[in-house]
Image (tube, helix red, strand yellow):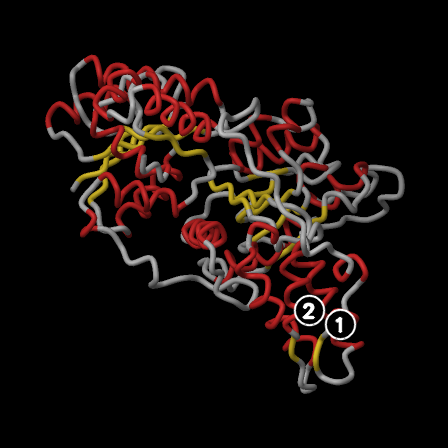
């Protein structure tokens, strides 16, 4: 079964093509909606992944979808959007999109769509080939999807933006990429953009010549020169000033830079990784981050989920950390202490969990970690707390998927459960409605 990928970004096309091929399907790629229409007319695919933002001279994703439907090509189309743009997603659904995915891609969602739309027997076994991170194999799909995207990114030389809350393991994710990269033998250099004063960061990155600024008495090579042939991690890149962002953009696009105070241009054979614990789209809206730099960095954007969304991984990770910090001393975690670890929300994520386990291992002289060995912030947690249930009708700010689910449920109630009438009222084919019922777990 053929899957058609329509996207104007070569690196993203390759990544998606690799993921589709790994799932056992034949992938074809085109760079514009115009090319896609010609291809669909001659050889209709079983499924289309369609990017919304394409070149200025090409149709947008929604326009391409409308053209596909106007030509009466009844192929399932999944839209791919760079931002969680509700208006675009709603327009895509109205134009007949079966589903939509947001960048960075969740590979678990991608596999699910492939399995549910195409022949199930052509899919892959999710239990095989799961990747390890932080010393354990994550149980949840969210972290596995992030690891699979990191693994796919490692096979290219494209920039990678690693996003996530403080303590989620962004530096470990960078090391994960390097371990699988062809640049592994080369140097790995890190720049903490938040720790270096703005006035010195440019010289730190690109180097400087004598007299370039007050106090520059000798020539100095920067981090780009130190990372030549290897990888440079720009940690907390959202803290970088916009003027320096312009120069970084040039390095990414043209593979060259000038040391501060020099007219000499140097080539940069460096793979760039960046990390942030801030929302880059929000920083763009505030004028603190350049949108063009973001688009160059987010060819691969990987979001590391917080520990509170990885409940199944908390105890295995705690036990692994315990073996690291306890050394030869026997240690185990009591059931009561394990309950408290599971109940805590871990605002500091894995870093907080490591500190908690290290403290407990020191205090637990009897070899068993008990509640009294845990920090007060963890041990004082109210274990009887419950999460307030959500309203059936989503409020403002809810995801498009949640709104669509609520609309389908409401329409089914209105039609007395008649799926044919519900599909007609929603403007969907019965096949598309069946897919969405399965997608959202609606059985009524």
Compared with residue 263, is residue 424 higher up or lower down, i.e. above or below? above
x 62%, y 50%: residue: 233
The answer to whether residue 28 of the structure is visible from this angle is yes
Residue at numbered disc 2: 337
Neighbour tally class for label 2: few under 14, some 14-19, many 20 plus, Cα within 10 Å: some
Compared with residue 240, is residue 225 higher up or lower down, i.e. above or below? below
x 75%, y 85%: residue: 366
Q: Position of residue 263 (x, y in %)?
A: 68, 34
Q: Position of residue 143 (x, y in %)?
A: 50, 53
| Quadrant of res 211 | top right
Q: Could you tell me which secondary element the residue under label 2 belongs to?
A: helix
Q: Quadrant of the C terminus?
A: top left
Q: Are marks 2 and 1 in contact (CB under 8 Å)?
A: yes
Q: Which mark is residue 304?
A: none
Q: Is residue 435 left or right of residue 379?
A: left
Q: Is residue 55 left or right of residue 44?
A: right
x 76%, y 67%: residue: 374
Q: Is residue 176 left or right of residue 423?
A: right
Q: Position of residue 218 (x, y in %)?
A: 82, 49
Q: Position of residue 412 (x, y in %)?
A: 32, 25
Neighbour tally class for label 1: few under 14, some 14-19, many 20 plus, Cα within 10 Å: many
Residue at numbered disc 1: 360
Compared with residue 373, is residue 298 higher up or lower down, i.e. above or below? above
Q: Could you tell me which secondary element the residue under label 1 belongs to?
A: helix
């Amino acid at each position: 079964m053929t899957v058609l990928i329509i996207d104007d970004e070569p690196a993203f096309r390759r990544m998606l093509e690799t993921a589709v091929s790994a799932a056992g399907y034949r992938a074809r790629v085109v760079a514009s909606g115009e090319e896609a229409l010609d291809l669909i007319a001659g050889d209709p695919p079983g499924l289309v992944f369609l990017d919304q933002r394409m070149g200025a001279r090409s149709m947008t994703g929604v326009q391409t979808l409308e053209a596909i439907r106007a030509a009466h090509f009844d192929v399932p189309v999944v839209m791919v959007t760079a931002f969680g743009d509700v208006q675009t997603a709603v327009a895509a659904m109205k134009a007949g999109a079966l589903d939509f995915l947001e960048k960075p891609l969740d590979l678990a969602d991608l596999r699910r769509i492939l399995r549910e739309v195409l022949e199930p027997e052509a899919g892959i076994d999710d239990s095989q080939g799961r990747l390890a991170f932080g010393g354990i194999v994550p149980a949840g799909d969210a972290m596995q999807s992030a690891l699979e995207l990191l693994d796919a990114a490692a096979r290219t030389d494209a920039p990678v933006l690693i996003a996530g809350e403080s303590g989620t393991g962004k530096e470990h994710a960078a090391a994960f990429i390097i371990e699988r990269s062809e640049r592994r033998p080369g140097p790995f250099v890190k720049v903490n953009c938040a720790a270096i004063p703005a006035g010195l960061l440019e010289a730190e990155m690109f180097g400087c010549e004598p007299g370039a600024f007050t106090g520059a008495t000798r020539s100095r090579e920067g981090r780009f020169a130190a990372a030549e042939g290897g990888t440079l991690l720009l940690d907390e890149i959202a803290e970088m000033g916009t003027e320096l962002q312009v120069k970084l953009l040039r390095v990414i696009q043209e593979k060259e830079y000038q040391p501060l105070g020099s007219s000499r241009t140097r080539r940069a054979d460096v793979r760039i990784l960046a990390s942030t614990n801030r929302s880059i789209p929000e920083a763009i809206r505030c004028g603190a981050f350049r949108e063009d730099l973001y688009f160059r960095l987010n060819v691969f954007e990987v979001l590391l989920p917080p520990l509170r969304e990885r409940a199944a991984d908390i105890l295995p990770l705690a036990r692994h950390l315990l073996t690291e910090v306890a050394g030869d001393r026997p240690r185990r975690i009591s059931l009561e202490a394990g309950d408290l670890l599971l109940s805590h929300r871990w605002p500091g994520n894995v870093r907080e969990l490591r500190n908690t386990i290290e403290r407990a291992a020191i205090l637990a002289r009897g070899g068993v970690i008990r509640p009294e060995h845990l920090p007060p912030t963890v041990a004082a947690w109210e274990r009887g707390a419950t999460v307030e249930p959500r309203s059936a009708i989503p409020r403002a700010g809810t995801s498009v998927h949640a709104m669509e689910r609520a609309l389908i449920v409401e329409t089914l109630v209105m039609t007395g459960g008649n799926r044919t009438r519900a599909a007609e009222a929603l403007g969907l084919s019965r096949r598309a409605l069946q897919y969405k019922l399965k997608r959202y777990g609606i059985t009524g």
